[in-house]
Image (cartoon, helix red, strand yellow):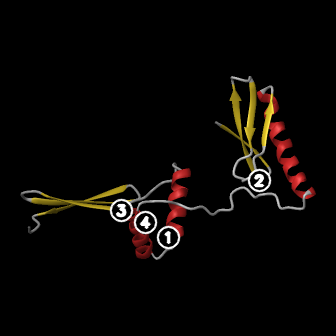
Amino acid sequence: MNILKYKEYEGTAELDMDRCVCRGKILFISDLIIYEVATPTELQQAFEHAVDDYIKTCQELEIEPKKPLKGQFNVRISPELHRAASVLAIKQGISLNEVVAQSVSSFVSPNVDINHNVHVTIIGNKETMAVSTAMGKPEWRNFSNAQH
């Protein structure tokens, strides 16, 4: 589904094949505001008109237009995941809110680099080798004749 944008609002762009119309609704507000036109080229203009009309109507009625997405939402997860996230937040000295914000940020920006530090030790019959990676740069060290 395509999303239309205008001012602080987003709206849907849908094709109704049964009725042969293009339609949509303003997203993320509790009021139901829909728009409908005959062709896709008219849809953005209809959406913008719907937003402007919504704002104007609210002013005439002396009420505040609903703001799309205040930045607050309820999340329901398993108690186990809740506990794990809370413990991790405490260990890292951040709030649970920051854990959720970082997680959502990673979800919506999947191309963000994630860096992990890994240390692996391989012990053989006569030598020990270790590799450490930081920022994806492996460093091998050979500990020949190491005591086991």
Q: Earlier in the sequence, mark 4 or mark 2?
A: 2
Instruction: Quarter of the image for the N terminus: give it.
Output: top right
The image shows residue 109, relative to residue 20, as above or below, that is below
Q: Residue furthest left?
A: 125
Spatial CA distance of label 3 from label 2 is 40 Å
Q: Which residue is mark 1?
A: 96
Q: Are marks 4 and 1 in contact (CB under 8 Å)?
A: no
Residue 51 spot, x, y in % from top left: 82, 47
Spatial CA distance of label 1 from label 2 is 28 Å
Q: Which residue is mark 2?
A: 8
| Element class at badge 2 | loop
Dot label at residue 82: 4
Residue 44 spot, x, y in % from top left: 80, 37
Q: Residues within 10 Å of mark 1 (few under 14, many from 20)?
A: some
Q: Earlier in the sequence, mark 4 or mark 1?
A: 4
Dot label at residue 117: 3
Q: Residue at x 43, y 66 (%)?
A: 82
| Element class at badge 1 | helix
Question: Number of callouts in the render?
Answer: 4
| Element class at badge 3 | loop
Q: Are marks 3 and 2 in contact (CB under 8 Å)?
A: no
Give the quadrant of residue 20. top right
Q: Earlier in the sequence, mark 1 or mark 2?
A: 2
Q: Earlier in the sequence, mark 3 or mark 4?
A: 4
Q: Please name which of the two marks, 4 or 1, marks the residue nearer to the observer.
A: 4
Instruction: Quarter of the image for the C terminus: give it.
Output: bottom left
Q: Earlier in the sequence, mark 3 or mark 1?
A: 1
| Element class at badge 4 | helix
Spatial CA distance of label 4 from label 1 is 9 Å
Spatial CA distance of label 4 from label 2 is 32 Å
Q: Residue at x 9, y 69 (%)?
A: 147
Foreground residue among 132 and 52: 52
